[in-house]
């Protein structure tokens, strides 16, 4: 039994999984499957079903493998955040990351009782930044501004309070190396002078500006562990009861037991949610002094979760009438999946809007959507399409205020 699909030649995942316990296998389409993973290679994930028969699913058709252990909830946890140049994220206890010569040793948040921590090798040149107290929204907002204005040098960042306002002061230069203990760094300033700083002085964090790489390995999946880390993997190898992961940037993690790993997420590269893309927007100009809505991502204009017939959709779009959204597809996707409806929060029972969905000018959907309608689950063929256009229009002046596209996603 094999799902029909072709896998790009550049995808290089070779995995052998001996004696792996039952997992939940989540394909891009269809219901989750319970099975025992037998192997994962460059083309297929192979598992055994309840009848002990082997079943193959192309990696390209995979969304995730849920291994059982749960990743932690970070809402009430204090942490610094170490981001690698490939997007991998390590959440570390405040002040725990050590810069040891040309390696960085990230600390780990506590995992479940009895679960052994992985061995982690992070070369200094794979680091993008270290932000102090990354769990604080205000710090993250300041950091985003800093990253948007940085130049071409590394930054040693100090958070200071001036006139009751916290500011980020930046010292430009190059982080040359750490010391053997990992608590100090040698920093060469822009004028060529070298200084030895305690790592603790970087109360804002450190930003690195690594040279551009000419060859970037492909991303295979995201590995999510029980310590709050998200690793962007270019290879995953199962050995015995453990797991070895190499990130796209070059860091290596060795999990001694699968109890340390929550999930293998294959969806990156296989699908794209519209809420993660930036469309070209066509809408009337704003009227001075009046609220102006076009669309919002993953929430209503009131900041509430998207809900259709009692079900919440963490990902999706809320679109205001007289708005058209154009998405560049580049011929990369095969299907567009979406749940269409008017949000549960709309109180007017007669609310209705017109929705048109086009692929390269071909009409895929052109209907009126009413508040009283059950949500419509649709799958549209967009194979080879260069552009997807979504248009929402009023039926009349006093009916219809918005439309939800729940779980709107493009799949390859």
Image: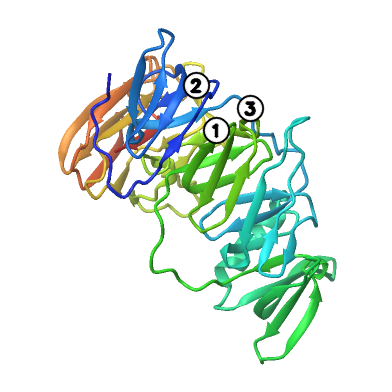
- On the image, the x and y values in percent for residue 371 come to 40, 19
Describe the element under mark 3 as helix, strand or loop.
loop
Residue 107, above or below 296: below
Residue receiving disc 1: 263
Q: Quadrant of residue 332?
A: top left
Quick check: 71 left or right of 383?
Answer: right
Would you say residue 176 is visible in this rendering? Answer: yes
Disc 3 + disc 1, Cβ < 8 Å: no
Residue 62, above or below 359: above
The first of marks 1 and 2 along the sequence is 2
Residue at 30% x, 24% y: name it: 378
- What is the CA distance from the residue labelled 3 to the residue labelled 1? 8 Å
| Near-viewer residue (220 or 119) | 119
| Near-viewer residue (98 or 277) | 98
The first of marks 3 and 2 along the sequence is 2
Quick check: 27 left or right of 154?
Answer: left
Would you say residue 398 is visible in this rendering? Answer: no
Q: Quadrant of residue 242?
A: top right
Residue at 63% x, 56% y: name it: 121
Circle on res. 24: 2
Residue receiving disc 3: 69
- On the image, the x and y values in percent for residue 178 come to 73, 71
Residue at 56% x, 72% y: name it: 209
């Amino acid at each position: 039994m094999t799902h029909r699909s072709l896998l790009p030649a550049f995808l290089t995942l070779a995995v052998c999984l001996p004696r792996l316990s039952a997992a939940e296998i989540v394909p891009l389409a269809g219901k989750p499957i319970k099975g025992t993973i037998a192997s994962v290679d460059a083309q297929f994930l192979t598992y055994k079903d309840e009848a002990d028969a082997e079943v193959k699913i192309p990696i390209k058709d995979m969304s995730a493998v849920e291994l059982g252990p749960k990743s932690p909830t970070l809402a009430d946890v204090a942490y610094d955040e170490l981001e690698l140049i490939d997007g991998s994220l390590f959440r570390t206890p405040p002040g725990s990351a050590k810069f040891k010569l040309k390696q960085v040793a990230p600390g780990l948040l506590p995992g479940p009782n009895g679960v052994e921590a992985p061995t982690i090798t992070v070369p200094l040149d794979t680091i993008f930044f270290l932000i102090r107290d990354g769990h604080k929204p205000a710090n993250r907002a300041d950091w985003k501004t800093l990253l948007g204005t940085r130049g071409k040098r590394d930054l040693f960042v100090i958070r200071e309070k001036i006139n009751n306002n916290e500011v980020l002061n930046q010292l430009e230069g190059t982080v040359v190396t750490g010391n053997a203990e990992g608590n100090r760094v040698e920093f060469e300033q822009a004028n060529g002078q070298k200084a030895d700083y305690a790592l603790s002085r970087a109360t804002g964090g450190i930003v690195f500006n690594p040279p551009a790489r000419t060859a970037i390995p492909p991303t295979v999946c995201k590995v999510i562990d029980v310590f709050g880390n998200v690793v962007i993997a270019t290879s995953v190898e199962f050995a015995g009861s453990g797991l070895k992961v190499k990130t796209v940037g070059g860091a290596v993690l060795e999990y001694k037991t699968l109890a340390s790993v929550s999930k293998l997420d294959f969806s990156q590269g296989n699908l794209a949610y519209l809420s993660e893309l930036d469309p070209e927007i066509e809408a009337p100009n704003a009227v001075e002094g009046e609220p102006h809505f076009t669309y919002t991502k993953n929430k209503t204009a009131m900041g509430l979760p998207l809900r259709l017939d009692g079900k919440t959709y963490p990902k999706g779009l809320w679109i205001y009438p007289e708005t058209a959204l154009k998405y560049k597809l580049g011929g990369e996707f095969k299907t567009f999946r979406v749940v269409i409806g008017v949000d549960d929060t709309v109180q007017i029972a007669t609310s209705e809007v017109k929705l048109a969905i086009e692929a390269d000018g071909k009409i895929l959907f052109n209907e009126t959507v009413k508040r009283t309608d059950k949500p419509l689950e649709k799958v549209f063929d967009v194979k080879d399409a260069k552009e997807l256009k979504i248009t929402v229009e009023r039926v009349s002046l006093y009916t219809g205020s918005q439309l939800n596209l729940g779980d709107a996603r493009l799949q390859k």
